[in-house]
Amino acid sequence: MSSESQINANRINGAKSHGAITPEGRLASSRNSLVHGLLSEAIILDGESADRFNALHDSLIEEYQPETSTECGLVETMVVCRWRLMRIWILENSAVAHQMRKDAVANELENQPTQAALAYGTLSDHSRRLDVFNRYEARFDRQLSRAIQRFDEVRNRRQKKKVIFPNEPNSGGQL
C-alpha cells in the first residue's frame, strides 16, 4: 500500500506531463511513427505516392485528434486500411481496363458499359482476381470499421474517466 506522501508525489508528477496539449503538439506527436518513414515504407508500394499517403495520414489525424498512444495506433490502423482499400479499388479498375483493352477488337462494336461488363465477366469466369479483390476489400473495410469503433470506445471511456475522476485532489471521485 502506498503512503500518503507517495500518493501526493505521484499526483504532482502525474500533473506535470499529460502528453501533447496543443493541436500542433498532438499532430507532431502522432507523426512520430512517420519521422523515419517506418509506417510509410511498410505500406507504400513502388509507384504509389508517399505524399498522398502522408496527406491521408494527416487528414485522419486532424479529424480524430488522437491524444494517447492507443488512439494514435488506432488512427494509424485507419490510415493503413483506408490506403489499402484505395489500392484495391485501383487494382480492380486496372484489371478491368486491361481486360477491356485485350478484348477491344472483339468488342469494338459494343459501348463502354457493355465492354466493361464483358471484361468483368471474363475476369470472373477465367480468373480469381475479382474474388480476391472483393475478399480483400471486405477485409480492409471490416478492419477500418473496427478501428473506428474501437477508437470511439477508447475515447468515450477516457472521457468518462475525466468526468468521474476529476484531477482535483481529495475529490473522492464524486461530482
Image: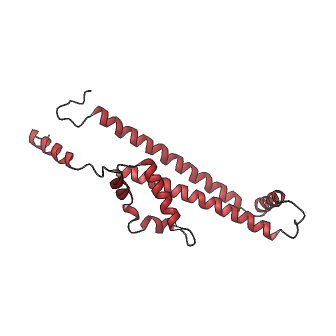
The foreground one among 115 and 130 is 115
- Extreme right residue here? 109
Give the image location of residue 49, x and y in percent.
Answer: 54, 68
Left or right of 33, for residue 97: right
Type of colouring: secondary structure
Q: Position of residue 17 (x, y in %)?
A: 23, 50
> Is 51 on the left or on the right of 98, as rendered?
left
Residue 1, image quadrant: top left
How far across and down, in percent of the image, does residue 122 sit? 80, 62
Question: Residue at point 40% right, 42% down?
Answer: 154
Query: Which quadrant does the C terminus fall into?
Result: top left
Q: At x 74% / y 68%, what residue is drawn?
A: 98
Q: Give left or right: position of 33 versus 15.
A: right
Indicate whether 151 appears above or below 73. above
Q: Residue furthest bottom?
A: 46
Q: In which quarter of the view is residue 39 placed?
A: bottom left
Front-most of 130 and 9?
9
Number of dots carrying numbers: 0
- Percent across and percent down for residue 71 are 39, 49
Q: Residue at x 68, y 61 (%)?
A: 92
Q: Residue at x 53, y 46 (%)?
A: 145
